[in-house]
Structure formats: C-alpha cells, structure tokens
Amino acid sequence: MMEQLRFDGRVAVVTGAGNGLGKEYALLLASRGAKVVVNDLGGARDGAGKSANFADDVVKQIKDKGGVAVADYNSVVEGEKIIKTAIDNFGRIDIIINNAGILRDRSFSKISDQDWDLVHAVHMKGAFKTTQAAWELFKKQKFGRVIMTSSNAGLLGNFGQANYSAAKLGLVGLANTLAIEGDKYNIKVNTIVPTAASRLTEDILPPTMFEAMKPNLIAPVVAYMVHESFNETGLIIDSTLGFATKTHLVRAEGATLRKKPTDPVTIESVKANWEKVVDMTGAKNISKISEVTLNLVEKLQDFEDRSKMDGDRESYWTTYSYNAKDLALYALGVGASVANPTDLKFLYEGHEDFVALPTFFVLAGMCMESPIVNQAMQSLGKFADFSNVLHGEQYIEFVGDFPSTEGTFTTRAYVVDVLDKGSSAVALVNSEIYQDKGLVYRTQQHIFVLGQGGFGGPRTSKVATEVVAAPKRAPDAVVEQRTAEDQAALYRLSGDFNPLHIDPNMAASMGHQKPILHGLASLGISARHVLTRYAGNNPSNVKALKSRFVKPVVPGQTLATEMWLDGNRVHFQTKVKETGNVVIAGAYMDLKKVESSSGPAPAAAPQSSGAALKSDALFAKIIEEVKKNAAKAKSIGGVFLYNIIDNGKTVKQWTLDLKTPVVFKGAPKGKPDVTMTVSDDDLIAIAGGSLNPQTAFMKGKLKISGNIMMAQKLGPLLKSEAKL
C-alpha cells in the first residue's frame, strides 16, 4: 500500500475557503495534519457583502474532526493581514492556495470600470499581495508551495467574461515568473485550472453537471501539488470530474517570410507563407524566454546559412521526423514479415538490433509535394502538376553514420537540371538531408513530366547519377516474393497518398485495370532481398542505391529480384514472375563489404565514450550497494549488461556481474544473461520514479533481451535503484 502523504508541521493559507473548492482544500489539508488559515470574506458571488459565517463553519468542521484551523475574514487585497494571521497563530507559513474569486459577468461593451477593477483586485491583486507577504519568509526557510487558480475562460476566453478572463490569464503569467524567481529557494509555484461546482457556478452550470463536478474530486490534485515531495514548478494543471491533465503553450516551427537576408518582407510575402506560419505540425513547448531567444538566434543563423548554400538556386527546405512506429510500418509496407526471423529487427522496436531499412530514408528526400519542379518548368514555359509527373529514377547515398531509429531531418531539395526527352521533360531533383547541421545522406530523383518536352534542352546531364546495366550473364542469385493484395494500401501509410495506389476510379482514369503498387514499394522489397543475400542483412553496410522504375506492379503479383555480384557492387533488376516484365532496371547497391549470408549481421561494436553521463553516479551507488550486500547479490547469480545509448547509438556500457559479484564499466567477457538498452535520460527517469519501467519497456524506451524474468530480481538488492 502506498505511504500516505501528510502535511504534519506545515501551515497552509487557503483564500476563499468558506465554500466550494477552497473549503475542500482546507478540509483535506487539515485531515492530513496541516494547520490551516481559512480565509473568506464571506461576500456574494459579485463580491458584495461580508460575513464571518462561511469561514467559521469550515473551521468548526476541521476542529470537530481533531484538526487545527483558524478563521480569517480579511480581503485578499490586504494579503499581508492574512499571512499575519498565520504567523500570529502558528509561527510560520508554508503553503498558499490563492483560490478567492468573484464574477461580474458582462458583455464587453457593458463592462464598467468597477466591474473591471473589482474582478482584477480580487483575482490578480489578491494573489499578488497574499503571495508577496509570504515570499521573504519562504526564501529564508528555503521552502514554499504556491497555487494560483486560473480558468479555461482565461486560457481560451469566454463570452461575457472579458474582465474575468484577463485576470485569470494574468495569474498564469504571475505564476510563471514566480516559478522562475522561487526555484532556487525551493519555492514551487503552479497553476490549477479547476472546473467545479461552487457559489460562482451554481446557477450557471446545468443541474446534472453541477452535481457531477464535485470540488472534492479536484482537492487531492491541488493537495499533491503543495506537498513537500512535489518538486515540479511552473505547471498548468487542468482538473475536473476526477480527471487531470497538463496544459502548456506551444510554439510552431514558423516560416521565413523572405528568400534572402537582403530581401524585404512584404505584405504579399507574408500572405504567401501564411500557411506555414500557422502550421502547428511539429510545434514544441517552450517554457522559458531564453529558449525563445535562443530559437530565434538559431533560426536567423540557419536562414543565413541556407541562403549562402542556396545562392541563386531555388531550394525547398523542410523537416522530416520519424520514430520506431514509422520504421516498423514501412518495413511491413515493403514486405517484411514476422514469418521471417531475420525481419524481426525491422519490425520490433524491442529487438536488441532494431534498425531501419535503408530505403526508408528515401522518404525524407521526396520532392513530390514541393513546388520546385513546377517552378523549374514554368521558367521554360512549361508546367508540372500532380496529373503529369511520374517518378522515373531514384538514388540514395549515405555519407555519414547510418541514421538512428528515431530523429528529425532537415531536407534541402532543389532542381539541378531539366532534360528534354522529346515528348516529355525530366527534372533532376537533388535532396540533401541534414541532422544537427551535418550531412547524413543525399538523394536524387528523376521526375518525368509528361507532355512537356520539346523546349530545346539537353537530353543528358553531367550531374545525373545514371543507372548501370546488369552483366550479360545468368544472375548469381534470385529471390522471389509474392506481394500482398493489400501491399499498396499498406505502403501508402508511410506517406505516399497518391490515390492512384488505392482508388480504382483514379487507376482506371490513368489506364490501369486496378490500383498499382508504388515504385518505391517494389524497390524496398527488392532492396531487402539484396540486403539479406549480400549485405549480411545489415543496413549500415549500405553505401548507395540506384534504380529505374520501368513498369507498374499490381498488388498480388510476385517480384523476382535477380542479382549479380561485382566486387562491392550488387547489380539487380526486378521482374514480375507472372508476366516476365522487368519493373526495376539498371539498379545497383554499393556495399561497404560483401557478406554472402542470409543470416543477421553481427551487432555493431558500441562507440566508446569517455564523457561523463548522468547515470555514472547511479552506477557508482549501485557499486556501493553490491559491496554492502555481496551475499544477496551472489544469490541472484546473473550477469546484467546495460547499454547506455544516445541517438540510438551505444555510448557507454556497464556490467553487473552478480555471480562474482562485481560491477564495472564495459561489457562482460562472456554472453550476459540480460541485456538492457536505454538512454541516459530515460535511465535516470526510471531510477527517479518519473518513468515507470513497464511503460518504458512497452514504449520501446527500455529494451530488454535475454532472461527478462531475471531482471526483476534486481529490485530487492538495489533498494532505491530497484526500478533498474
């Protein structure tokens, strides 16, 4: 059973505690040992009148149950008097819950100065004066817990409550600043956004809702937030009906409103970029002004860097984020299956060798949705749109470390040349994919623009990465795989939503009997075959890949990948077995080394890191615990290896050899009984209790291989580190 959280020795001030939420806060804190100042002016909902009855009644209820409380009838505008009541009666102050409030609802045009001033006086000035009166005492004792009470009307607005909404959002700003100023003194300031039945809402809410929104469902949330064990600050917590959730402000990626640093910003350029300005895809929470400033500096530097890189060329910059779910979905889309044991590492994020298929990364370099091809064609008096472009060829080359299993890329795409093939044009589109400003890989697409040739341009280009014909001999290996009837429907979920691949009517209008398979899906299937046969099934062994798409594939047909080994290059072409048609031609995969095996590749050696990690201190304590409890450690009798990762790569290893027993940095000589792979931050979160180990395991943040049941035996030994 969880230990009860108590407030023995703590003194709490609760304003507006004569009824509703404030009353529930006071009763709950008193029942858990706190001495409570029950403040309530006893006025009506609009602030009129005064009565001691409300506060006295709550104090009596507390005392009748053996608690300690005193009433206070001062206005919160004179907050120093309320704090004086606490000091005079109990000698200290630890907790302030700013709960007092009034309503003076009017439509905006009818709000009087008095309506505005009174609402702001009680909500804003009251919280300010009461908290300020205790602030220096909090700082001296190195402890304080403060709650501001906001409202969804403040966060979102509400008709007829302009005065109230402004005050309630103002309290969020006050809390945010106090959270910053108080943090080094162990003063935690947070905001509650409650929706509960009270004097303020009794004739506003429908009767059934009023009955359901009981204040006692919210009180435990606030009580926890003012407990000494609660160390978070600057939070906005929304709670009602026995439910609680965090709310925070998010900031979108935004958009650059000019192409070059020397260009002006015009009304027209703002309009042209407005969709990007308001696009919340990839929006992030920024909790500090310093983060905003840093973000702006980074954007300015990035803008200048991109402008220098682009020169006079029209480039299209975008970001692409992915995670383990995206990798597994893609692998299924290109025919990976749990029926094949060597495919499991592409499908299961908990696999110790979980990795992306190399062709997955083509997706980040795709240019189909960018305007650059059409812009290039327009400069030639031609046009390109969704209806007349085809993906003709694809190239990808890895120039840095093989990408990790989750991350975000920044992609620059640009047309490097346009070829005239007579009836059609071909736009050569280069993409450069960066991570942390370093080039990771590059791609090139040949985009056929049907019916737009004849402009007198070149037929070939020196900058084109060309396909290479296969050797004129029988293939060295052939791998066959039947595609599923749903192959195109599944692959499209990786991002290519062209209805040609799922809509029968669209397929018929383009001359196909039924929806066809994406060319990149066929390429992904073929590349898997090559990877398995000649690359040791190791994606990081791939240097480059090139292919030409020749004819369509209908889902349900069988693909036969024919392969020829030539040094470290594997030439391949793909046919439809049922028709004999070549669908991928002139293709090749360049490898770092040839591994002619269908089995899985050996695990890559971890990168060593001499840099200190947060978890180093954790393992230092584990070493102490093992020394103290050597007999208990030996009774477990297992060898546990921790792989500490950063961006998907192992940067440090720790071994718990409980057979000896000994704990040391590095890998064991033999095979460990249990291997646990986790990032430095996630390991600290698990050890600190903020991340449940079962949740971490289910989400793929903690990967365990070997004897999983043995891992659970570590708890009794490690005590405070039991969750490891």
Image (cartoon, rainbow, N blue to C red):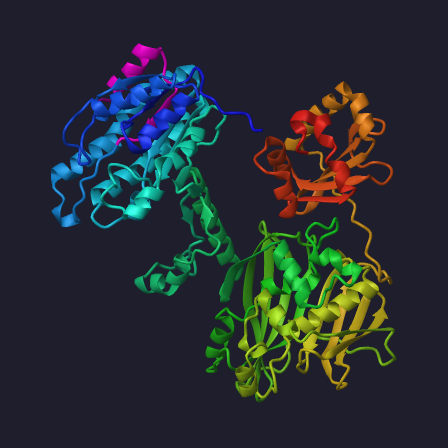
Picture quadrant of residue 214: top left
- The relative height of residue 679 versus residue 38 in the rendered view (above or below) is below
- The relative height of residue 208 versus residue 510 in the rendered view (above or below) is above
Tell me: 641 left or right of 370. right
Q: Which residues are magenta?
A: 78-100
Position of the N terminus, as image quadrant, is: top right
- The relative height of residue 449 versus residue 177 in the rendered view (above or below) is below
Where's residue 514, x and y in %? Answer: 61, 84
- Give the residue at x 22% y 44%: 203
- Give the residue at x 48% y 70%: 371
Position of the C terminus, as image quadrant, is: top right
Where's residue 138, x and y in %? Answer: 39, 19
- Give the residue at x 13% y 49%: 109
Tell me: 360 left or right of 660. left
- The relative height of residue 124 versus residue 309 in the rendered view (above or below) is above
Where's residue 681, x and y in %? Answer: 61, 37
- In terms of depth relative to the viewer, which is nearer, 635 or 555? 635
Whether residue 218 is visible, yes or no, is no
Determine if the magenta segment contains residue 97. Answer: yes
- In terms of depth relative to the viewer, which is nearer, 669 or 293? 669
